[in-house]
Image (spheres, rainbow, N blue to C red):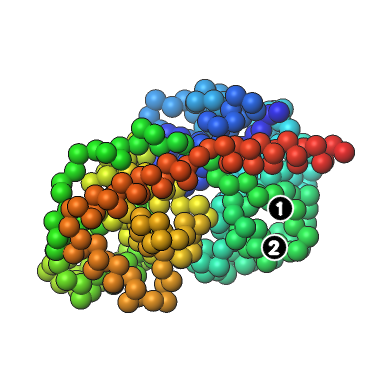
Amino acid sequence: MRILVIIDYYLPGYRGGGSIRTVANLIDALGDEFEFIVMTRDRDWRSPQPYERVPTGEWVRVGKARVRYLASRDWSFRRLARLIRSVPHDVLYLNSLFSPLATIRSLLLRRVGALPDTLLIVGPRGELACGALGTRTMKKRAWLTFAKAFGLFRGVVWQASTPAESDDIRREIGPSAHIVEAIDCTPRYDDWPGNAPREAKVPGCARFCLVSRIAPVKNVEFALRLLHGTAGDIDFDLYGPIDDAEYWSRCEAVIATLPANVRVANRGSVPHAELGPILARYDLLLLPTLGENFGHTILEALAAGCPVLVSDRTPWRQLQSAGVGWDLPLEDAAAFRRAIGEIVSMPESAHAEMRRRAREFALRAADPAPAIEQNRSMFLGAVQRRSA
């Protein structure tokens, strides 16, 4: 089976968020069974320059996939249609619902008959969750209304990573949407640096990190406001690209009001290969997100032995009962502050035990077998039903 993946950003990019990891993990898991062909941009998210040492407009082998990096001119409707038609494929797999280039253009070309009549699978990647739809709402609602009115979603198979995403798809697309649940593939993390050398946890001191885009949906401003009035010596480092300059200005305004015992630093983006050792240095990942479809960073932090404090709007739940962190309602800021205070006051012995449980939790959660079987069944079953 040949699966053509069209995605905004792919390896070696890392600023484009979790969808890069999701697709890379999927191809690594199933690339020996299916032939994956990827079309993507020739640069990372918001980069003005193409990748170095990556040929543009040629097919190259990246892991278990053939990849073609497209220059800006290749995303015109005419060129994109010609490129898609030039690649024999059984499935067209789109990894976003709101991508103007990868998804919207592909759906429009399909609707006017400019693309082969192959099976289409769309993975919204959490974009239909209430928290995600709460940002840039008017544009997203306008696109959904247009797409449904003109039949752009006709015959689409929707991939949901969780039961909650299935509910989101039915709510926004309609009760008749054809949905297949297939959770995101993950690596095993056996070699993730969970036992990397690190400074001992000192009671009254803590090192926090947040790894995400600086965007309203990630709730960075809320995370910063939580640190008002907290006792102890806190370093809070932010890793990730600035998605929204206006929002970052609001965050900077909050940073300017924080007390002297709280120090915040914007560390910028880091390549994914460097993330494990970085996470292993911190006492807590603080990510009160408005919603995560999967939350690769949460699992990666746990695999690195870093406890997490997240909202209850991710698939990672019951963290407190597992002794690896907290998943709390955003309406209860006091509960977030109590968890922060608990980490700050925690001695090395208790924190070392929490780190151990976090890594064990992640290794159990990253069992690849269920995800591989679900994604395999999604592709095979969808094609078989269409052929019947």
Q: Residues within 10 Å of mark 2 (few under 14, many from 20)?
A: some
- x 50%, y 25%: residue: 63
> Label 1 neighbourhood size at 10 Å, few (<14), some (14-19), many (20+)?
many
**Nearer-the-camera pick, 243 or 349:** 349
> Is residue 28 in view?
yes
Q: Is residue 167 above or below residue 179?
A: below
Asked whether, in this view, residue 76 is left or right of residue 277, the answer is right
Quick one: quadrant of the N terminus? Answer: top right
Coordinates of residue 342 in the picture (x, y in percent) = 25, 66
Marks 2 and 1 sit apart, C-alpha to C-alpha, by 8 Å
Numbered circle sitting on residue 179: 1
* Total numbered labels placed on residues in the image: 2
> Could you tell me if residue 143 is visible in this image?
no
Q: Amino acid at mark 2?
A: Arg
Q: Which residue is mark 2?
A: 170
Identify which residue is drawn at 15% across, 46% down: 199
Q: Is residue 137 above or below residue 83?
A: below
Q: Is residue 380 left or right of residue 195?
A: right
Residue 147 at x, y percent in the picture: 71, 59
Residue furthest right as drawn = 388
Residue 163 lies left or right of residue 358; in this view the side is right
Question: Quick one: SS at disc 2?
Answer: helix
Nearest the eye: 333 or 43: 333
Please give the name of the residue rendered at 56% of the width and 52% of the height, measured from the top-left corner. Answer: 125
Residue in the foreground of this view, choosing between 11 and 58:
11
SS of the residue at dot 1? strand
Q: Would you say the residues marked 2 and 1 are in contact, meaning their CB atoms lie under 8 Å apart?
A: yes
Q: Amino acid at mark 1?
A: Ile
Residue drawn where x is 75% and y is 63% of the image: 175
